[in-house]
Amino acid sequence: MENFIEVKCPCCKTILIVEKRTGKIVEERRPILENSTGDRFEDAFKKVKERGTVAEEKFRKMQEAQKSKQDRLNALFKEKLKEAEASGEDVRPVNPYELD
């Protein structure tokens, strides 16, 4: 690490690893989190934990959406069933053995 300099941007917190001799940027380390702790391992660990909670939240929202959709369809089915019963029409399927 003697041949390199670490430069940290005060705005975006990106760390640039610059080679002393040539002045070329060798590596660019962008922060993993917006509010970085400074320790990349700890930041990565926090991000993995956060991703799990985000996935659980998305799954819960999808479950709620599916349940509301199912409730809507059940209500529609009951409504149409009542309409069919009120119309008095024979809505039974035709039994092929009764045709004789």
Image (cartoon, rainbow, N blue to C red):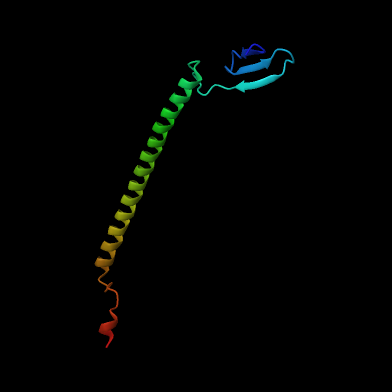
Residue at image coords 59%, 15% = 11
Compared with 5, 93 (above or below) is below
- Please count the marks in the image: 0
User: In which quarter of the view is residue 4 placed?
Assistant: top right
Q: Position of residue 90 (x, y in %)?
A: 26, 74
Instruction: Decide which of 15, 69 is in the foreground and name it.
Output: 15
Residue at image coords 33%, 54% = 73
User: In which quarter of the view is residue 86 placed?
Assistant: bottom left
Q: Is residue 36 left or right of residue 73?
A: right
Compared with 84, 43 (above or below) is above
Q: Is residue 53 left or right of residue 13?
A: left
On the rendered image, what quadrant is the N terminus found in? top right
Residue at image coords 30%, 61% = 80
Q: Position of residue 74 (x, y in %)?
A: 30, 55
Compared with 50, 67 (above or below) is below
Compared with 71, 39 (above or below) is above
Residue at image coords 35%, 43% = 63
Instruction: Decide which of 79, 95 is in the foreground and name it.
Output: 95
Q: Position of residue 91 (x, y in %)?
A: 28, 72
Q: Residue furthest right?
A: 22
Q: Residue furthest bottom?
A: 100
Instruction: Decide which of 99, 16 is in the foreground and name it.
Output: 16
Q: Residue furthest front?
A: 2
On the rendered image, what quadrant is the C terminus found in? bottom left
Q: Position of residue 30 (x, y in %)?
A: 58, 22
